[in-house]
Image (cartoon, coloured by chain):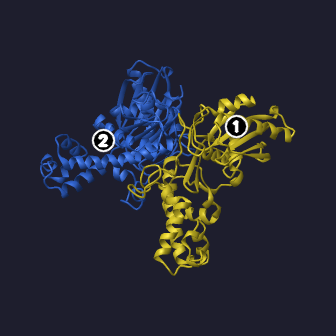
Chain colours: A yellow, B blue
Amino acid sequence: MYYIGVDIGGTTIKSGIVDRAGNIVLKSAITTEKIPPKQQMEKVGEQIIKLLQSSNLSFDDVLGIGVGCPGAINGKKGIVGYSSNLKWTNFHLKDVLERVTGKTVRVANDADAATLGEVIFGVAKDYKTVIMLTLGTGVGGGIVIDKKLYEGTNGMVAELGHIVLRANGLPCGCGRKGCFEQYASATALVRITKEYMLKNKDSSMWNAVDFNLDKVDGKTAFVCEKQGDKTAKRVIAKYISYLSEGCLDYCNIFRPDAIVFGGGISKEGANLTDRVVGYLEKYEYGYKGTPKPAILTAKLQNDAGIIGAASLVAEEF
Amino acid sequence: MYYIGVDIGGTTIKSGIVDRAGNIVLKSAITTEKIPPKQQMEKVGEQIIKLLQSSNLSFDDVLGIGVGCPGAINGKKGIVGYSSNLKWTNFHLKDVLERVTGKTVRVANDADAATLGEVIFGVAKDYKTVIMLTLGTGVGGGIVIDKKLYEGTNGMVAELGHIVLRANGLPCGCGRKGCFEQYASATALVRITKEYMLKNKDSSMWNAVDFNLDKVDGKTAFVCEKQGDKTAKRVIAKYISYLSEGCLDYCNIFRPDAIVFGGGISKEGANLTDRVVGYLEKYEYGYKGTPKPAILTAKLQNDAGIIGAASLVAEEF
């Protein structure tokens, strides 16, 4: 028995056949077009049919289809409430794809699906209650409780980058001020790196970016710190403190079994997680005597979209 | 059929028989003694037996016994991990009380039980996913998801007063700095009131407390604001902004159906909730286009302990 995972992005839509162990058997990609969502999803239906034909499998071999989609999703109804990436509004995705394929379809926000993917098939397989923080352009997130994706009554949950880390702090795109995302995203790390560089003209980070601030990225400080640069070390310490403060918040709310980091910054691996663990230990994981969650790095990475989407149907079985 | 609710406090232990509608049929209180927890809970067993005798009911009329207890509780195992109020450590409460009474016993943290009580029997009866914030000496909390108490894998969850509102802000008893509790508790409101009074010697709040700062309490600013005092108005606006920022965090994480305020400050009722609603509206409940949770005042108040504890067994039925 197999699952189908569909990863809808702003430029491409990837579909894949996933086996029970969470391996992608076969996948394909089509371009996301500027057409009405109904037509687009009918094309995805065709994409899936072709994929099955190429693999010598049929719909009888498929338990269901999971779809990860950016934006505000009502998973219970299978509706895309609003997706700014796709410009889709109030679209009954589940209905359309079920009609085309004849299979059960489950839709979720892409970050939520990626979180469930890590719990069902990825690094958090041995854990039940898991928080995932995706450290990229922003800070995304997902919540899995007792191996089930938390979707709330009407979806649009787990905006985990949008809790306040500093009331009246830096303005955030969401309209609030001082959100976690403004301090713990890759974008934030780049900003902090530049701030420290401007105040420390002798830092080796200047050489690393050819004296061009525009070349600073999320790796600059990590790389230069390993080479012994003191300013880079302070940048990383600052970033770790912000990221860890958010983690302590989630420890105190959920007392999760694990926190998983995804997104660009998570590629630092143990270099990142070991430091976060150090900070969390210092603050006793938020509260004296509480259980210690494991701090992990996402495993699925590039295939997180397809495998996460597939996990939406795998969860039920 | 009836439920028994037991509310364990540092000075008294209250037990009550609760009917299916959430009304207390009969209750009694005994003094919390400085004796080993096993002996104490055996006395609670006797208390329950006497209560049933007085009411002409028997154990056959009782579905189960719920116990609300301060401290870190592992509800799944029925163990009091640690309670600083009671000085109990690693005590198998459920086992002892089940042996004495022969009935099924479920234990939870008292704030968690109070939250479930509001959802099963109180103001949040029509809501499924509910966050409760208890605004007292500190800020306590509870999380109910889909009408079930969230307990995590090992308990000790929903320390909702201990998320950071201001990184590196005021020191908190938990060891962190800038916790929500330091800005949104009754204690915090008293501190803010005093700060503003000291800077505004013409405020009518000075008259209200007979020019004695020690008489300032959580009502001072609320009362004087109604009488038109401008300084009091600024105090309340400040407090509301802090409380609401925490609420916005919980909106973005859970997108709950309702947020319920309990504790001393909640007695302001609509005067408090209307203002919080105003602030939340301004920030679109955390994120543009998201569902709006109801903002409610706890209903059970003085009986929240017994009824909340009883709801622990009612939840299952």
Q: Nearer the viewer, mark 1 or mark 2?
A: 1
Q: Which residue: 81% across, 31% down?
A: A60
Measure how far apart labels 1 and 2 are at the Cα level.
45 Å
Q: Residue furthest front?
A: A34
Residue B262 visible: no
- Left or right, B106 with respect to A102, comes to left
Q: Residue furthest right?
A: A56
Q: Which residue is mark 1?
A: A313
Location of residue A65 with respect to A233 vertically, above or below:
above
Query: x%, y% of residue A33?
Result: 67, 43
Location of residue B168 with respect to A148 vertically, above or below:
below
Q: Quadrant of residue A70?
A: top right
Query: x%, y% of residue B248?
Result: 43, 45
Chain to which mark 2 belongs? B
- Left or right, A241 with respect to B189, comes to right
Residue A148 visible: yes
Q: Which residue is mark 2?
A: B265
